[in-house]
Amino acid sequence: MFTSWCNDADGINGRKLVATIRDTKMVEVRQRVIEARRDDFTLVIGSAALDGMGTKDRLSCLLPDFPAQVVQMENIGSDLHVPVQAGNRRRTANSVARLSAGA
């Protein structure tokens, strides 16, 4: 839904978004973060029960995270981390646009 909403509004800085779903299978958070840092621009509206397992790897490559929820202490308030509040898609889109512009 977020991807369609952004793309309907001409994307982020004119660039269309492509959603990639990565299944952590509960305990493969670090492996999925490593894949994401290789292939993706940011993590958006995701959630993992053991999200703290991937925080160090995510930060090592400056991969931003806009999670739907945060679970573990290692990830709460970590750098490049903007929790998404329900009904606040515009704030999330604006934050992604600032990051993509290098602000």
Image (spheres, rainbow, N blue to C red):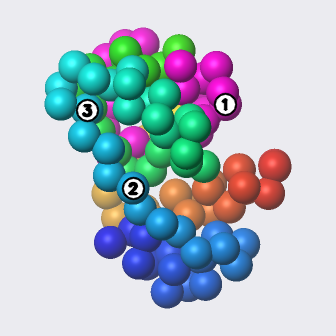
Residue 33 shown left or right of residue 101 in the figure: left
Viewer-side residue, 71 vs 28: 28
State the residue position of label 1.
62
Question: Magenta part of the protein: which range?
Answer: 57-80
Image coordinates of residue 4 in percent, x first then y, are 41, 78
Considering every residue shown, the one lying at the far left of the view is 25
- Callout 1: SS: loop
Amino acid type, residue under disc 2 in the picture: Thr
Residue 21 shown left or right of residue 58 in the figure: left
Regarding residue 90, the answer to whether it shows in the image is no
State the residue position of label 3.
24
Mark 3 crowdedness (10 Å alpha carbons): few <14, some 14-19, many ≥20: some
Residue 13 shown left or right of residue 72 in the figure: right
- Mark before the other along the chain sequence, 2 or 1: 2
Q: Find the distance from the CA under tag 1 to the CA under tag 3.
A: 20 Å
Helix, strand or loop: magenta stretch: loop
Residue mark closest to the camera, 1 vs 3: 3
